[in-house]
Amino acid sequence: THKNIHKVTEDLEANRYNTAISSCMETLNKLYLLKSKSSFGRNASWQEALESIIMSVAPFAPHLSEELWQQLGHSDSIHRDHWPELKEEYLVSEKITIVVQVNGKLRANIEVDADASKEDIVEAAKSSENVQAFISGNEIRKEIYVLGKLVNFVV
């Protein structure tokens, strides 16, 4: 929810409306997937998430967002001083996705802890099943690691 608030706010300020709407759609899909897989729903967090999405969509779909706002139990207009509050502490991720390449070609994406060391990330990249198919039996001449982004093996 807070990543969506951050993205939509930035996109609105930069006049990137399509990506703002796309972010709202992705977030809503993730919320409903979360709701279907767990008991998440009909609590304060669910209400906050829905209100946030509706406030984020309001500039693009004013009539629909007004109707949904009323259905969530609000008597005022969504277009009067409402914008979701961004809480920066929720933007910090515990996991990051690292791209793994062999000879410059994408071979895998791995998910690792955000605070993992370079050595741990390189080892995780080497143990990826798809990467193994390209490096096994070959000498790794160079390991390139770009902090928090990618690992490339030159064989």
Image: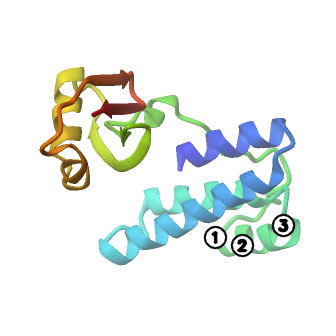
Q: Quadrant of residue 79?
A: bottom right
Q: Secondary structure at mark 2?
A: helix
Task: From the viewer's perspective, tell me whether residue 16 is left or right of residue 150.
Answer: right
Q: Where does label 3 land, which residue?
A: 61
Q: Which residue type carries mark 3?
A: Ala
Mark earlier in primary sequence (2, 3): 3
**What is the spatial separation of the Cα atoms under label 3 and label 1, in whole angstroms?**
16 Å
Marking on residue 72: 1
| Total residue callouts | 3
Of 4 and 104, which appears nearest the observer? 104
Marking on residue 68: 2
Q: Which residue type carries mark 2?
A: Leu
Q: Quadrant of residue 151?
A: top left
Where is residue 106 shown, x and y percent of the image? 42, 47
Where is residue 88 shown, x and y percent of the image? 52, 30
**What is the spatial separation of the Cα atoms under label 1 and label 2, in whole angstroms?**
6 Å
Mark earlier in primary sequence (3, 1): 3
